[in-house]
Image (tube, rainbow, N blue to C red):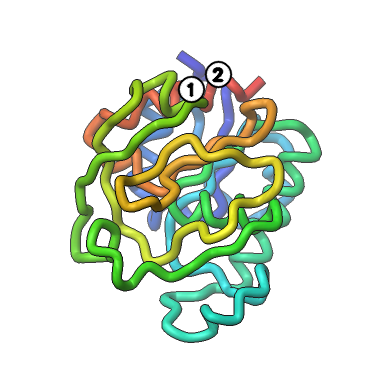
């Protein structure tokens, strides 16, 4: 158990029930706040899912239309939070949009996946197989595993100092990891995998030192 670990989550608790339950179940303390002064006192950062990230942050002109629920204020704040936690060598876990935010921070770009039948956002999660190439995903799940999917953007060019841990069968990057293993992220939603994703958060908490 990691009862003393505090995990910062930008936002208000009532909008992130699944993440609250996931963090509490692991024995950590979820710290929901929009006050950035609280963040430095936490042991790790959890970047949650949400709307699309504005292309103005990664200079990808082909994504100027067809975006969903862009919140530039949140985009900028989360980029700052990634900077804050990386500067202090603290652990970061990105989920879906969180993976995309991490990739953008490290100089990567994103693309829309409207025509991808495995990933196209639907009313509920889609289930598909991923192939693991190493890092935390292979360590936890072996060479292949089943994950869920509900997203509109995905990694186009991988950011600097990041490496791919998993891909779907049609080539979408499903998990990434940073140098030193302090940064991990998944394109899928482990907090919605009925306990199957709990091992990922346990791995993350081990890095919150």
Please identify the residue farthest to the front as the structure is shown.
170
- Say which residue appears at 53% left-offset and 48% top-offset: 47
Q: Position of residue 30 (x, y in %)?
A: 50, 37
The residues bearing labels 2 and 1 have C-alpha atoms spaced at a distance of 5 Å
Please identify the residue farthest to the right as the structure is shown.
87
The answer to whether the residues at label 2 and label 1 have Cβ atoms under 8 Å apart is yes
Label 1 secondary element: helix
Q: Is residue 155 above or below residue 82?
A: below
- Could you say which disc has been placed on residue 203 in the image? 1
> Is residue 87 or residue 59 the one in the foreground?
59
Q: Quarter of the image containing the C terminus?
A: top right
Residue 199 figure quarter: top left
What is the number of callouts on the image?
2
Task: Please give the residue where the numbered disc 2 appears in the rendered image.
Answer: 206
Residue 183 figure quarter: top right
- Say which residue appears at 48% left-offset and 22% top-offset: 203
Label 2 secondary element: helix
Q: In this view, does 89 lie to the left or right of 42?
A: right
> Is residue 17 or residue 97 the one in the foreground?
97
């Amino acid at each position: 158990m990691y009862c003393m670990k505090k995990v910062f989550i930008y936002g208000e608790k009532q909008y992130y029930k699944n993440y609250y339950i996931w963090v509490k179940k692991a024995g950590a303390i979820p710290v929901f706040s929009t006050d950035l002064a609280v963040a430095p006192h936490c042991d790790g950062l959890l970047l949650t899912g949400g709307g699309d990230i504005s292309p103005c942050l990664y200079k990808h002109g082909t994504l100027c239309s067809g975006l969903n629920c862009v919140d530039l204020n949140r985009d900028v704040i989360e980029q700052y939070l990634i900077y804050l936690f990386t500067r202090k060598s603290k652990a970061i876990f990105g989920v879906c949009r969180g993976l995309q935010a991490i990739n953008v921070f490290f100089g990567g770009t994103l693309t829309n996946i409207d025509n991808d039948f495995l990933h196209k956002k639907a009313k509920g999660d889609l289930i598909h197989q991923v192939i693991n190439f190493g890092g935390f995903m292979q360590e936890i799940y072996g060479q292949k595993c089943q994950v869920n999917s509900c997203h509109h953007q995905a990694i186009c060019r991988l950011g600097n100092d990041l490496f791919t841990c998993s891909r779907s069968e049609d080539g979408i990057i499903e998990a990434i990891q940073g140098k030193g293993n302090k940064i991990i992220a998944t394109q899928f939603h482990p907090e919605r995998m009925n306990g199957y994703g709990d091992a990922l958060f346990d791995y993350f908490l081990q890095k919150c030192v």
